[in-house]
Structure formats: C-alpha cells, structure tokens
Image (cartoon, grey):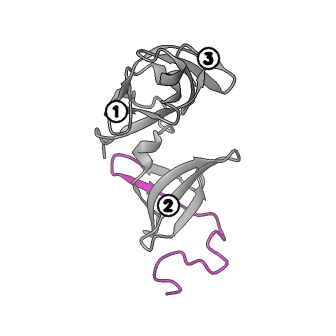
C-alpha cells in the first residue's frame, strides 16, 4: 500500500514569540531539528495558511524562526500553538529498510503470524525509554506494545500490514489475546 498522497505530515509547532521583530520559537518534530525548513512552505493542517521560512537557527531545544510576513511581536504572538505540516509526497523515501514515517504506519492493521487480529495502529510513541506502538482493537480498547524488532518483526508497507508478536506473558492478568477470549 503506497503512502496516502493526501496525508499531511506534522513537521513542527510554533511556540512563543522571541524578541520584537517577529521571530518565534518552533518545536521541530524530526531527527534533524532544522529539517522542517527543507520542504518548502509549511501549512496549517487544513491548508488554509502557508508559512515560508525566511531564516532559522537552533537555540537549545527549539529553533528560532523568522517567517516571511511576520514582522513584529504581536504577529508572532498570534501564531503561538500553530502546528505546521507539509504534504506527505514532499518527503523523500526512507533510505533504510528499517526506517518508516509514522504517518505511513498509522491506520495499518496489525496481526500475529498465527493470524491473531490485534487491531489498528493509532500512534507511535516515545516517552524516553524506547519506541512504542499503540494499537486499538475492534472493541475500542488500546494496547501499547514495544516497537522493536522482536515484538514487531515485520512491517509490510506494500500489503499494508504490520506483524506483531507480543512478548511472552504480555496478555496475562486477565487481558484476553483476542476478542473472543473471556467474552
């Protein structure tokens, strides 16, 4: 299954104003903090507003950014909280077979090698202790699995399927492995 051309990818979020000349603090989402500047105009989620980066510089854990047309502190303050996206098709294909864009995985079904349906991917998370994959089953319950090679041995983007092998004992304490168990 090819990536959805209509998807927008969240690249960054505008924070507080910085100074009086229209600069803002931007929190980037990506491996390279300045990468959000590489893909042309950034857009709001609905595409109604576009932002062109005039300049950007890294300062601690944020990027101080000047957007064209934002010339004073009041204009900069009005942008606080705005999320910045690009269309998915602007991103290059991942170079490594083990690299994926989160947006390409969200919405994909998951199953075990034995055919067990675990549900649909709703998020990829990292709270500092490693990557996690959040899956919602048909009943609406969510389960969070480690997102590692052992638990997620294969991601088949071509067929739109993610294989999950839960760690031994993962579904103990009364939580059924499938919808029919315990109902």
Name the element at disc 3.
Answer: loop
* For marks 1 and 2 on the same chain, the one whose residue lies earlier in the sequence: 1
Q: Is residue 148 visible?
A: no
Which badge, 3 or 2, comes first in the chain's sequence? 3
**Which numbered tag is attached to residue 135?**
2
| Residue 122: x %, y % from top left | 46, 55
**Which residues fall within the magenta stretch?**
156-183
Q: CA distance from mark 1 to mark 3?
A: 30 Å
Report the residue marked by disc 3.
Answer: 19
Q: Which of these two is toward me, 156 or 174?
A: 174
**Is residue 63 something one can see in this rendering?**
yes
- Counting residues from the start of the chain, the first of labels 1 and 3 encountered is 3
Q: Residue at x 41, y 71 (%)?
A: 138
In this picture, residue 132 sits left or right of residue 1: right
Q: Is residue 86 magenta?
A: no
Residue pictured at 38% horizontal, 34% vertical: 44
């Amino acid at each position: 299954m090819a990536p959805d051309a209509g998807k927008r990818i969240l690249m960054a979020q505008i924070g507080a104003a910085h100074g009086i000349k229209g600069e803002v603090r931007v929190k980037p989402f990506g491996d390279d903090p300045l990468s959000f500047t590489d893909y042309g105009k950034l857009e709001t989620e609905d595409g109604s507003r576009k932002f062109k980066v005039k300049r950007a510089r890294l300062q601690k854990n944020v990027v101080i950014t000047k957007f064209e047309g934002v010339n004073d502190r009041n204009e900069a303050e009005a942008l606080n909280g705005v999320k910045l996206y690009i269309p998915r098709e602007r991103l290059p294909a991942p170079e490594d077979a083990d690299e994926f864009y989160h947006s390409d995985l969200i919405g994909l079904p998951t199953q075990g090698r034995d055919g067990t349906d675990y549900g649909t991917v709703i998020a990829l998370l990292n709270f500092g202790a490693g990557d996690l994959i959040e899956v919602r089953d048909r009943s609406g319950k969510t389960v969070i699995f480690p997102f590692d090679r052992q638990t997620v041995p294969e991601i088949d983007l071509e067929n739109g399927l993610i294989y999950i092998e839960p760690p031994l004992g993962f579904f103990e304490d009364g939580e059924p492995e499938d919808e029919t168990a315990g109902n």
